[in-house]
Image (cartoon, helix red, strand yellow):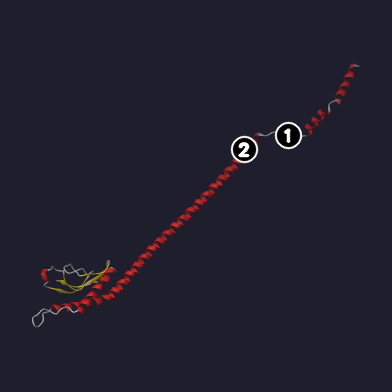
Amino acid sequence: MSDAKQTVEQQSGDRAESPDGASARAGEADRSPAETTRQGTHPADEQDAVTRPAVDDASEVEGDLDELVGIAAQRDEYLALAQRTQADFENYRKRVARESASAQERGVAKLAKELLPALDNLDRALEDAGAAVRAPRPDGGAGAQEDPLLAGVRLVRSELSAALARIGIESFSPVGETFDPALHEAMATTQQPPGGAGSGTVVEVYQPGYRLGESIIRPARVVVAA
């Protein structure tokens, strides 16, 4: 009799279990493995969560560095191009300056060559007039006084020579110098040089030479001691 009563009480106790307990056990039974996993964090997932941002940052930094290297290379290319352009322009400017100076010198030399014959004629006229002035008169008196016209010719000759000197043209008369074929033109030689001049020495100048800087416009025409 007591055993039967105990069995009945146990069954009654099972039926009398609280609804909350039953619901909790039902909820545990119905919960999926994925939900159970989401409630807890796996160590491998934590490592991946830390590693992914670090990798992304490194890739971004590397991309920025590549971009900076490309910009620096482009800058160096533009700088080299600017330097070459500047050097080319400087060379062009110097070449134009040289060509301009050379053209100006050629023009001056050409003008001088046109004027030199007139200077030579003025020199001959002055020399002949000076000889006439210095010559004694037939009555034994002094030579005639210098004609005012001759004085005017002398003044013109002097002004013309000064104008040539202002543009860099100068005359040279190499009496007593050693003959130099680059500067002198030998018109004759003499076997008995005056004053005992040495062989190859310029003893007389027929026409003075003219030069512009280092350029010889006309060599001096001279007589050389043999």
What residue did someone put label 2 on? 50
Picture layout, residue 224 above or below residue 93? below
The amino acid on which the numbered mark 2 sits, given as a three-letter code, is Val
Please tell me which residue is depicted at 11% across the width and 71% down the height of the picture.
Answer: 194
Q: Residue visible at 88% across and 19% down?
A: 6
Quadrant in the rendering for residue 24: top right
Residue at x-position 89% and y-position 21%:
8
Q: Quadrant of the C terminus?
A: bottom left
Tag 1, which secondary structure?
Answer: helix
Residue furthest toward the right? Answer: 1
Q: In this view, which residue lies farthest toward the left?
A: 140
Residue behind mark 1: 36
Q: Give the side of residue 33 with respect to residue 22, left or right.
A: left
The residue furthest bottom is 138
Observer-nearest of 111 and 12: 111
Identify the mark nearer the N-term, 2 or 1.
1
Identify the residue at image location x=79%, y=32%.
Answer: 27
- Furthest toward the top, the residue is 2
| Closer to viewer: mark 2 or mark 1 | 2
Q: What secondary structure is marked by label 2?
A: helix
Mark 1 residue type: Thr
Q: Position of residue 54 (x, y in %)?
A: 59, 40
